[in-house]
Image (cartoon, rainbow, N blue to C red):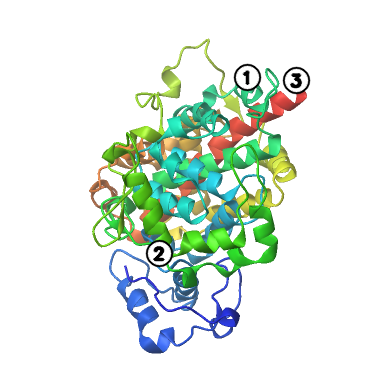
Amino acid sequence: MLPLTRQCPPRQRPICVSCSLSCKQLGWCGLLQQGLLQGELSRVHSPQVVKMSSSDPERPQFLFVKVLASRGRLEAVTQQMGYHPQYLDSFLKTQHYLMHMDGPLPFDCRHYIAIMAAARHQCRYLVNLHVLQFLRAGGDPQWLRGLDFIPPKLRNLNEINKILAHRPWLITKEHIEVLGGLLKISEWSWSLAELVHAVVLLAHCHALASFVFGCGCEQDEGLGGRGSLKPSSPGNQCFCEATAGNVGGMAKTTALTPAPVSVQSLDSCMELDSLRERMQRIHHGSDLSAGHSPLTDTDGEVTGATNLACYMQDPDFGYQDFARRDEDQTQVFRVQDYSWEDHGFSLVNRLYSDIGHLLDEKFRMVDGLQSSAMAKRQGCEPSVFKRGIWNYIHCMFGIRYDDYDYAEVNQLLERMLKVYIKTVTCYPEKTNPEMFDRFWKQFKHSEKVHVNLLILEARMQAELLYALQAITQYMIS
């Protein structure tokens, strides 16, 4: 992909992707005249990426311009979600808040947690993306050597990461007690606010990995696992990341970080030469296996890690059918007893300010996407078809709705569609790239993306319900 190499004057820097200024207010410093933006935007108008909506012709392109300005590239995920621009807008706001705005966790730790989460599904696309952002945030390059080189506090999150990714129904308040320090208070203990932030990050990245594999983004030759990663220049920094208020949040330190991150150190990390130097430090580190870290080639481009095993433990632990579990192991999760609307939303919003509103907007946004043509082909109402997919996904994780007749699932979803949904949801790394094209051929590309968005959000909410219920039980015990 074509990176932006020209820097904007201070007063004309691109705004944060979550802002809503018009294109005229952004100030592109002649980039449009030089054809840099048009070239990148025209490239995405292929049969496999977003087309302009007739009802709102400028909306997707406007979002693409904002993403391109702040990141210097249009990632495959952004292109695919662009089929549904309202959802894309909500997704970008949530992800930006999670990764770049003030919150309980330091910035480098957020990206490392994302690396850990993506590695559970062998998603190189997300691992490579967050490796670069981890370094740009001032992260210690030694951490990229694997879990043995990170602080114990962060390493202790591995168990919850593993369970949430594959069998979230096994999460209990005992897991929270260990992390929260109830059994042993120490500098390794997590505060409830930090833990909620970490849990949302894990669920977000696990679910996003499903979308990446489901839509074939892992095969993208730009920022995907098979391509090379080109560090962005300082001029591509999102404006909101450089504001005084946000830097203040970045300077907050916990046991996870060895030292505060200043504005100067952040800018330094974002310099291309500095980033190359940091990558070389990893490459030439003592006892470092070439397969355990990102490397730089002779041209200074950052290439992806060839082995993700260093970022996870117990790699054989995977999804197991909930219906085949031991009857004594766990009970069915009934939404009537613990729901997002009545319980999860208030808890997460209280411990991590405003994230509940953003997540709730995203859940509602995917539910409100138009799917009349898709549902008509299945012979039902759009709401009925979407609820069938949502409840089928939750059912695979042991979550049941007492007011739903699950016989409808077999009536609404043909066998091949169910196979696709289960694969993308439960073990996305096993998704065959051809599945997206061969299965459910009667659906348009945008409709297939819509189904993958439903998978993303349903899976994320399922993981959050289990994790937040365990945190609730820990708090009241």
Measured as percent of width and height from the top left, residue 234 is found at 48, 69
Pointer 2: what residue? 272
Dot 3 lies on which element?
loop
Task: For label 1, count other residues whose C-alpha is less than 10 Å away and answer few (under 14), some (14-19) or many (20+).
Answer: some
Say what secondary structure mark 1 lies in.
helix
Residue 265, compared with residue 397, is above or below; it is below
- Labels 2 and 3 touching (C-beta < 8 A): no
Q: Position of residue 415 (x, y in %)?
A: 31, 37
Disc 2 marks a residue whose amino acid type is Leu
For badge 1, the amino acid type reads Glu
Earlier in the chain: of badge 1 and badge 2, it is 1
> Does label 1 or label 3 sit earlier along the sequence?
1
Q: Can residue 337 be seen in this snapshot?
A: no
Q: Is residue 364 left or right of residue 230?
A: right
Q: Which mark is residue 194?
A: none
> Quadrant of the image for the C terminus?
top right
- Inspect this view and state whether residue 193 appears: yes
Q: In the image, what residue type sits under mark 3?
A: Ser
For the residue pair 148 and 26, the one nearer the viewer reads as: 148
Residue behind mark 1: 174
Q: The N terminus lies in which quarter of the figure?
A: bottom left
- The mark that comes first in sequence, 2 or 3, is 2
Mark 3 packing: few (<14 Cα in 10 Å), some, or many (20+)?
Answer: few
Residue nearer the viewer, 357 or 218: 218
Q: Nearer the viewer, mark 1 or mark 2?
A: 2
Q: Is residue 133 above or below residue 23?
A: above
Category of crowding for the residue at label 2, using alpha-carbon neighbours closer than 10 angstroms: few (below 14), some (14–19), many (at least 20):
some
- Measure the C-alpha gap from mark 1 to mark 2: 44 Å
Q: CA distance from mark 2 to mark 3?
A: 50 Å
Q: Which residue is mark 3?
A: 477
